[in-house]
Amino acid sequence: MDPKQHVYADLVAAGHEVDRMVADLDDHDWDTPTPAEDWSVRHQIAHLAAVFQLAALAAGEPASFVALASRLGPDFNANVRTALAPYLADPPPTLLRRWRAQRAAAEQALAAVPDDRPVPWLVRPLPAPVLAAAGMMELFGHGQDIADGLGLDREHGDRLRHLVEFAVRTWDFGYQARGLAVPDVSFRFEITAPSGATWAFGPVDAEQRITGPAVDFCLLVTRRRHHADLAVRATGADAQQWLEIAQAY
């Protein structure tokens, strides 16, 4: 398989993993609370459906996406509520069908983007494989909320590499989101894959270092667990601060 295509195949697999959590739920189980305040399983799937709808539009009809994005207001939470509303109005079987359709549309549209064309997105244009990795990050984070709400265990393979690479690529976002100065230092990330392999990024001799297992690292950067409850470790004052604000998106 073309290396570029791996992320698209892994995006499909990540979607199926979350789908299996909800496919056989009774209607009342869709209202099970999740760790996200005031969000049930229904809200989590509605959010994923809305995100994948945007991704399909951005990849397949860039001009239409840009026009839509230009109409969004400055209130992020209000934009989210507006995006979720039509999905939350659906009964669970309809919501499930719509989410599957939006996933399929986004998967196909992203895989069809030419290598040399960036995809417009909410903050800045992204290469299609990077936007696919961002979609996997959404599935990981909101899938964890669903798993926590339903009391399910998850198994992760080495497709988490896409998420780790995305988080390393956006390592400074936590500072930007809080209006903090980004330290003028290099970080070394040494992350242990589920298979036991080591994924390393950054200068070998960097004084600021982050180490730990990939699953815990992804739980950290999606802000689903506090670093004190994870096996992610930091060396260096800047790296210690980064653990407190790590945020991939």
Image: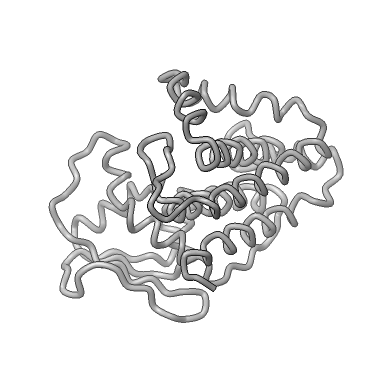
- In the image, 184 versus 63, the foreground residue is 63
Q: Residue at x 51, y 42 (%)?
A: 59
Seen in the picture, residue 43 relative to 244 is either above or below; the reply is above
Q: Residue furthest right?
A: 26
Seen in the picture, residue 167 relative to 103 is either above or below; the reply is below
**Quadrant of image for the C terminus:** top left
Q: Residue at x 67, y 49 (%)?
A: 104
Q: Residue at x 65, y 42 (%)?
A: 34
Q: Residue at x 45, y 28 (%)?
A: 66
What colouring method underlies this structural image?
Answer: one colour
- In the image, 64 versus 39, the foreground residue is 64
Seen in the picture, residue 87 relative to 203 is either above or below; the reply is above
Where does residue 86 sit, x and y in percent of width and height? 69, 25
- In the image, 2 versus 198, the foreground residue is 2
Where does residue 27 sit, x and y in percent of width and height? 85, 39
User: What is the quadrant of residue 91 in the picture?
Assistant: top right
- In the image, 241 versus 200, the foreground residue is 200
**Quadrant of image for the N terminus:** bottom right
Q: Is residue 160 left or right of residue 175?
A: right
User: What is the quadrant of residue 178 in the picture?
Assistant: top left
Q: Residue furthest left?
A: 184
